[in-house]
Image: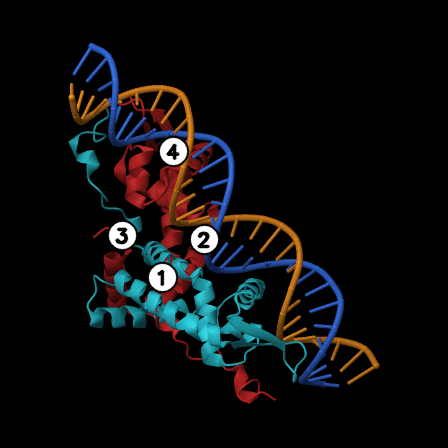
Chain colours: A cyan, B red, C blue, D orange
Amino acid sequence: MIPGYGGPMSDLPYAPSRIRALPSWLLGRAAARGHRLVADALAAEGMRMMHHAVLSAVAELGPVSQAELGRTLGIDPKDMVALVNDLQRDGLVTRTPDPGDRRKNAVEISADGRRRLRRTQRLGDRANAELTAALTPAEREQLIALLTRIALPGE
Amino acid sequence: MIPGYGGPMSDLPYAPSRIRALPSWLLGRAAARGHRLVADALAAEGMRMMHHAVLSAVAELGPVSQAELGRTLGIDPKDMVALVNDLQRDGLVTRTPDPGDRRKNAVEISADGRRRLRRTQRLGDRANAELTAALTPAEREQLIALLTRIALPGE
DNA sequence: GAAAAAACATGGGTGACACCAACGGGTTTC
DNA sequence: GAAACCCGTTGGTGTCACCCATGTTTTTTC
């Protein structure tokens, strides 16, 4: 029998590990859990997390080009095409040529989109509440503040 | 011209957005940046983040089964097979049948693995330092503490 | 002790994200 | 007007998370 291997202690969950003290690792695990919670919640509306993010940004920014949406949310232009395709197919946004700049599409939210957004916002908020259920409101705000400062790539 | 669309203010980066105040969204962005930094650093050693994580866990836990590795790190057993395959192919770990339980493999780190781990640990730590460069040491510890409490799925 | 249940390592496969290269049409800059 | 840049789009890749199935070996249950 190999010493230290197997035995009655081997069923201890989560033995101490150097890896799990690294921000990058913890961020990956926490993000995976957050994504799972939000994705499961939004699945009830047939939407993915990115759909909801784009829909929300469109509602805030008014008629907006796909490129600016991508810059605001940090989404690749290629991926934005597919997302707006889906939202347009479901009648949640309109995509019309920009009269002022014929390169751009003016993406705008529809009435159906607004109704859908209200529901997905509630679902997303609830999932985030569950995600941060172990935190006090003050701690949650602190987490948001810290994450905001390390999420940006540039400065 | 559509009011509020285009114009001199449209080049403002990152207009305020409701989405970007959600923990789940911030976690996703921060995790993506962290993964990018760590992955780029580890690429110099031909390893991915998961390789380093498994190698580090093997070094800590001594001879250990793949199933327990998976439970410790939250990695799917199927994915663990491929990771240990890679590490074994590169001579960083050994995979021998467990004499006490013939279902299990006893995964153990090799001398080469230890040398490699020292380098990848340095690279990973440096990448995490860059990731949290905007934070004070105290804030970094706070972030780690908060993340630890929301990363675990169960309790 | 024999049958049932569970655990282990593997295989095959899917979906969501992030990212990159290229290209044609449009616009701005010089 | 030519060069440089921006926009939307198509095509593709890589990483990670997750699922179901199977054969072998334990452990549990009766």
Q: Residues within 10 Å of mark 4 (few under 14, many from 20)?
A: many
Residue at horizontal 38 percent and vertical 66 percent from the top? B25
Say which residue label 2 marks.
B39
Image mark 3: chain: B
Between marks 1 and 2, how big is the CA–CA gap?
14 Å
Give amino acid for label 3: Pro
**Of marks 4 and 3, the one in the foreground:** 3
**Three-letter code, disc 1:** Ala
As drawn, B117 above or below A69: above
Mark 1 belongs to chain? B
Mark closest to the chain's N terminus, 2 or 4: 2
Q: Position of residue D3 (x, y in %)?
A: 75, 76
The residue that label 1 is drawn on is: B129
Q: Mark 3 highlights which residue?
A: B153
Viewer-side residue, A79 vs B130: A79
> Which quadrant of the view contains residue A8?
top left
Closer to the eye: label 1 or 2: 2
Q: Quadrant of the N terminus of chain A?
A: top left
Image mark for residue A54? none
Give residue A114's quadrant in the image. Answer: bottom left
Element under disc 4: strand
